[in-house]
Image (cartoon, grey):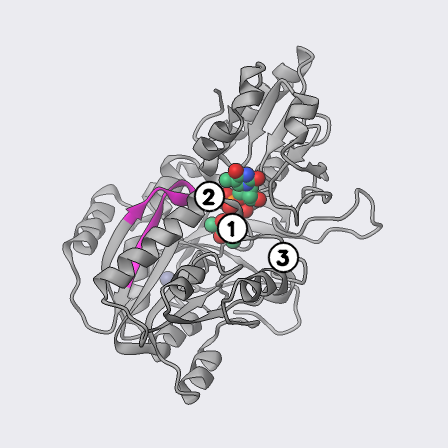
Amino acid sequence: MMIAGAASVTEQVCRSCGGSHIDTFLKLGTTPLADRLPSSIDDGEEEPVFPLNVAFCGDCSLVQITETVNPRILFADAYPYYSSFSQALLRHSRDNVLDLIERRGLSTGSFVIELASNDGYLLKNYVEAGIQVLGIDPADGPAAAAIKVGVPTRLTFFTRELAESLRQEGIRADVIHANNVLAHVADTNGFVSGIARLLKDDGVAVLEAPYVEPMIDHCEFDTIYHEHLCYFSVTALDKLFRRHGLYLNEIKHLSIHGGSIRLYVERQERVGESVTNQIAHEKARGIDSIDYYRDFSATVDTLKVELSALLHRLKATGASIAAYGAAAKGATLINTVGIGRDLIDFVVDRNTHKQGKYMPGQKIPIRSTEALLEAQPDYVLVLAWNFLDEIMAQQTEYRARGGKFIVPVPTPRIV
Ligand code: JHZ
Ligand code: ZN
């Protein structure tokens, strides 16, 4: 866990179970922080870089990176991620809310909390239905945006201590949402025990996280960066929740973010088939053992070499190349493969908070999506490949004019 004040610490034991059988199976070198976008090519300030090594815990099966960057550095003032820039994500979140309102019979007397509520992209759906909500998020830009759309938000990190003080205020939740945040938290156990403290006896915590199986099978190694401390299997999650008197009773597979799982966690133990079947599946495939991860490093190396060769080959024919999506995963991709301004002229992104800035490390300029039609590059490397369908649908004009997309994972291809 974090030593107060230090920029980062290298963990010696498992983040979840505290066991010491930690086996590193992938080393991605040192990389800059994926969501820290420099405002100029040379602002005279060295970008901090940190090691990016991935390990498997032989005791509880949790896949995790071993470096913990101080969250105050990771989620600092200018945290640029705003959930509401993807239509697909907004739809996905709204469907989740409507389903829960129906399944759990939520009404105006219910109380819903979201941990890492970002710009209010999810909770606003409850507000619309007249249900009381509270968002908790430490990033000031997104939190301010949430408050603006009518989502009450506390600007802070969620911890066990915060859960205690909310409880003392008389707050307890029928539903606690936590999407793409469990993997981001340095104190994994504190976060889960905080959920246990805040949940009403018959409440449900609904969490979403990228699932480790598609990450390995589809070589989504670019989703590894310092914000993502854990890469969850159901086996590892089941153990984590049980440690805090909570039960992972149901899971759903989701296509979002390259393959995620939604977890339904309650105080009562009523583990359904979706969970027992998935744990059996993980056992059968060896996902609960290091063997499953052994070849990953070689697969990643092959992808890196192929992608670099493809870009250099295209460039050698005189082609121009841009990129789509100043995604955090894009930062890992360009910095581990070594894709710089010699190959990519600019990156486009809809997020106005990212435009005008530069990609971490490689300092490729970020522009608005209109730049694609203005410059009409021959190829566009899709860094936000998880939203490929949405991006392709939106870029029909670019494609009609002969533009082509390069998709980097699971193996580089031109579409
Ligand atoms: P996106 C995010 O990672 C954030 P990122 C975070 N690190 C996390 O945990 C994971 O998700 C799970 C832009 N875009 O969301 C928006 C367009 O420009 O895939 C984003 O900048 N036009 C907390 O950052 C980027 O692309 C579009 O049409 O890797 C996508 O980033 C769409 C759909 C997106 O993930
Ligand atoms: Zn462990």
Q: Which residue is mark 1?
A: 84
Where disc 2 sits, the SS reads helix
Lower position in the chain sequence, tag 2 or tag 3: 3
Residue in the picture at 54% in, 55% down:
227
Give neighbour class at mark 1: few <14, some 14-19, many 20+ (Cα, 10 Å): some
Residue in the picture at 68% in, 45% down:
360
Please tell me which residue lies in front, 17 or 95. 95
Q: Is residue 410 left or right of residue 43?
A: left
Mark 3 and mark 1 in contact? Answer it, CB < 8 Å. no
Label 2, label 3: how far apart the Cα atoms are: 20 Å
Q: Is residue 48 magenta?
A: no
| Label 1 beta carbon within 8 A of ligand 1 | no
Give neighbour class at mark 2: few <14, some 14-19, many 20+ (Cα, 10 Å): few
Question: Which numbered mark, 2 or 3, is in the foreground of this view?
Answer: 2
Range of the magenta residues? 253-264
> Whole-percent x and y of residue 174?
31, 73
Residue in the picture at 45% in, 67% down:
115
Which amino acid lies under the numbered mark 3 shown in the image of this protein?
Tyr
Which amino acid lies under the numbered mark 1 shown in the image of this protein?
Ser
| Label 3 beta carbon within 8 A of ligand 1 | no
> Whole-percent x and y of residue 311?
61, 21
Q: Which residue is mark 2?
A: 87
Q: Which residue is mark 3?
A: 79
Where disc 1 sits, the SS reads helix
Q: Is residue 60 left or right of residue 136?
A: left
Label 1, label 2: how far apart the Cα atoms are: 7 Å
